[in-house]
Amino acid sequence: MTTGNSMTVISDKSFVNNSRPLDVHRWSEHSEVESFVAPLWHMFNSEQNVATGGSKGRPTKRIKRDNMKVLLLDLYVCWCEDPKQYLGISSNNNHWSKGRYKAIHLSATILMVLDWLVEEGLVDKRKHFHNSTNPSLSRTARYRASERLQSMFKTALFGLDDICTHEDKECIVLKQVEVKDEESAEIAKSISYEDTPLTVSMRERLTAYNKLLMQSHIDIHCLSVPVIKTEIKKGPLKGRSKLVTIGQHNKHVRRIFSRGSWGMHGRFYGGWWQQINSEHRGHIFINGNPTVEVDFKAMHVALLNAQLNAEVVFDPYKVDDYLFPELDRKVVRGWCKSLVLTAINAKDRSSAYAAFRSDAKKGSPEKQLKNPQLERLLDTFILRNPHLQDYLCSDQGILLMNKDSMIAAEIIDTLTAKNIPVLTIHDSFIVQRHHFAQLRVAMIMASLKHCGRNLIAEQEEFDINFGEEIRWGVINEKAVNILPKYEPCEQYSQRLLRFCEANGLNKVMSSTGRGLGARRINVLK
């Protein structure tokens, strides 16, 4: 490590894969954050004034203090996520121009602050490089907190829960696919658009939802440290592990549309709960209460059935015993489900089979399946659902995503209006267990409104006996009551207490909690 006025440029190569872009919307109004930034900002100001002959105020008048605040906050979050992780930051002034998706409180002058932090030995730098032969291999400069700054972070009196996303971050995103040449991969980039009554309305509703999420404590009750190690499922880093940090800084939700159209895609993205598996999601607590996850069963198949006014098939992915008889039926059913969903999104069968194998885990049996075997599996599904044949391998997925996003938006809006936080994972929804009934009503009403029928829903961790002639609500209430009961760990309770104190909330503890857990904490506003 080098401190003082000498720049630290490190030589390790981990920056190539272990990095992420700077989050320009990182923000906090916490007093301890201001206290942390203030002395560094004063040092920067003083040195800038000396460098320009003591012209007090002039050189930094156009450099907002926010530039340093955002840098330090995201360096802190990056360090919390992984001390070896880097931030990729562009040195191109055009990158910092104003726009719908840019941080309006930053400018290219942030680079002056960044250079100063490097010169002071507070930030380590890995230089950028440009590959003229293959621009996709080019890399922006990489930065991370030096050991000196890390030591300062360790004694800081703020934490991840004191950091959030700036309220001005655009939450309605429109993307367009760009292809530079025949050999280049398709890249979806965010594009600008003119606001309409539709986009204004969507933004207002989603902003209200994000505000409710920020006012809610969302955590996992059994984690002593709020970090989960997961595996990257897709992309060039597929198979590598990544760390998902849980806190206020990682809850902002956006709605993303594709192909330059408001009628394509439109699903909700963001929130750490979308980055973890269902097993971990089962341990989520909201405002001190255990939760339940409910999802629409075989949603895209159900949406197609509704569109065609076809009869409901309870389990469209069921596979006959003669197909792969040596394997467990649940395993083969899982293959069928994955293949059908892939085929709904694919443009032809060949690309569907290739995508199926690409998504399969390395070394898994499904990774080795050949096209003829996958064709038999897909044909078996079509034999049981012949009316869906024309909708497979015909690029229907992006339209169906738009339909399921409309249903999700309806559910979010309904529950937000009732001050009930709900977490979305596209076709499944998580609420506090005592809000289960409100969620089921919202799901029923949304599916009736947008597809004309009540779509089948199911709960995680519970198999429902459809032979019983009992109303859905009664069956599911039974399921809620027999879900596991949890005792939060001490570290979780401390995080909840700190959140309540920071946000001016009262804590009321109960030993019963309507059968929702061994201990239940209600957060009252």
Image (spheres, rainbow, N blue to C red):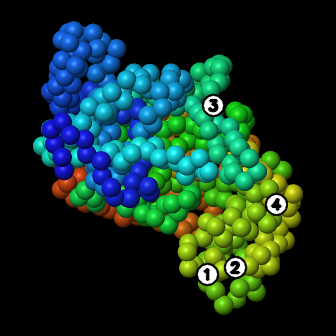
Residue 470, image x, y percentages? 59, 59
Of badges 4 and 3, the one in the foreground is 3
Tell me: 50 left or right of 263: left
Q: Are marks 4 and 3 in contact (CB under 8 Å)?
A: no
Query: What amino acid type is highlighted by mark number 1?
Result: Pro
Query: What amino acid type is highlighted by mark number 4?
Result: Asp
Measure the C-alpha gap from mark 1 to mark 4: 23 Å
Q: Are marks 1 and 2 in contact (CB under 8 Å)?
A: yes
Q: Are marks 2 and 3 in contact (CB under 8 Å)?
A: no
Residue 191, numbered label: 3
Q: Please tell me whether mark 1 sits on a helix, a strand or a loop.
A: helix
Residue 221, image x, y percentages? 29, 56
Sooner in the amino-acid sequence: mark 2 or mark 3: 3
Residue at numbered disc 1 = 365
Measure the C-alpha gap from mark 4 to mark 3: 28 Å
Query: What amino acid type is highlighted by mark number 2?
Result: Leu
Measure the C-alpha gap from mark 2 to mark 4: 18 Å
Residue at numbered disc 2 = 369
Measure the C-alpha gap from mark 1 to mark 3: 40 Å
Sooner in the amino-acid sequence: mark 4 or mark 3: 3
Sooner in the amino-acid sequence: mark 1 or mark 4: 4
Residue 405, image x, y percentages? 63, 41
Is residue 56 depicted above or below 487 in this figure? above
Is residue 487 depicted above or below 500 in this figure? below
